[in-house]
Each structure stands twice: as structure tokens, then as C-alpha cells.
Image: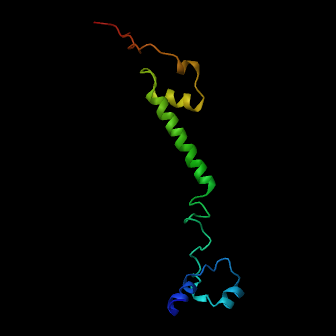
């Protein structure tokens, strides 16, 4: 059957994570067991838990979507609209006066008497 060392090589590489402790002992493959923490049942190094809580990821996602929405509206705004007008439209609290075009502001008339 080949050399003796090659016949025992399988014992070092035995997949023991599906065996009971009794089976591992009976087969004599204790040396192939991995130390704890190496996640022998994991598939392709996938994590079982996410790096942040679901609440944190939801809040960050909402803020990112709101920021992108505001940016799009700000870029597409008309020249006479201000950043505050865009913010009002984004949050849904704008009045019709905030969304309709305004005339250019006229300078206040001088009411002081002339000399």
C-alpha cells in the first residue's frame, strides 16, 4: 500500500468537525483537530455577525440617502432658489412661495430728503 508515512498522512488532515469526540478518539485523529476560534464550520470565511448593529447601519443609510437627495435637488435648482429653499423642499415643509420663481430683489428706495 505504499510507504507507512503516507498511509498515516490522512490522520493529520482529517476533517473532524462533524465527528463526535468519541469518534475522534476511536480513530486516533486528535492531532488533526483545529484549535478553538478557527471556525471550522464556516463557509468561505463568511462572518456570522455584521460589523455594526442593524440600527446604526439603518441610520447611516438613511442619512446617506438624504444627503444624496439634497445634493441632487441642489444641483438641479433654479438660480433664484436658495439653499434654504432646497432644504425646505427636501424635507417637505416648503410653501408655494418657496417653490415659485421670485423677481430679482430691488434695492430699497432712498426716502431721505436730497440736498
Q: Quadrant of residue 38?
A: bottom right
Which quarter of the figure is the N terminus placed in? Answer: bottom right
- Looking at this rendering, what residue extends furthest in the front direction? 1
Q: Nearer the viewer, residue 18 or 37?
A: 18
Whether 23 is drawn above or below 41: the answer is below
Whether 5 is drawn above or below 88: the answer is below
Q: Is residue 26 left or right of residue 32?
A: right
Q: Nearer the viewer, residue 106 or 30?
A: 30
Q: Nearer the viewer, residue 25 or 50?
A: 25
Instruction: Report the residue at 51% width, 89% height from top.
Output: 2
The spot of residue 73 in percent (x, y) is 49, 29
Q: Is residue 76 left or right of residue 97?
A: left
Q: Quadrant of residue 28?
A: bottom right
The spot of residue 51 in percent (x, y) is 56, 61
- Looking at this rendering, what residue extends furthest in the bottom direction? 4
Instruction: Report the residue at 50% width, 38% height from top.
Output: 68
How many numbered circles does the render carry?
0
Which quarter of the figure is the C terminus placed in? Answer: top left
Instruction: Report the residue at 52% width, 31% height from top.
Output: 87
Q: How is the image coloured?
A: rainbow
Instruction: Report the residue at 55% width, 28% height from top.
Output: 89
The spot of residue 13 in percent (x, y) is 55, 81
Q: Is residue 36 left or right of residue 23?
A: left
Amino acid at each position: 500500500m505504499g510507504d507507512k508515512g503516507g498511509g498515516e498522512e490522512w490522520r493529520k488532515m482529517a476533517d473532524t468537525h462533524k465527528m463526535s469526540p468519541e469518534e475522534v478518539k476511536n480513530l486516533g485523529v486528535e492531532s488533526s483537530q483545529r484549535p478553538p476560534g478557527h471556525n471550522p464550520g464556516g463557509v468561505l470565511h463568511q462572518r456570522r455577525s455584521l460589523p455594526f448593529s442593524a440600527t446604526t447601519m439603518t441610520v447611516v443609510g438613511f442619512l446617506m440617502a438624504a444627503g444624496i437627495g439634497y445634493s441632487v435637488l441642489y444641483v438641479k435648482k433654479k438660480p433664484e432658489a436658495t439653499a434654504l429653499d432646497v432644504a425646505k423642499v427636501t424635507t417637505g415643509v416648503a410653501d408655494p412661495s418657496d417653490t415659485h420663481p421670485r423677481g430679482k430683489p430691488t434695492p430699497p428706495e432712498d426716502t431721505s430728503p436730497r440736498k
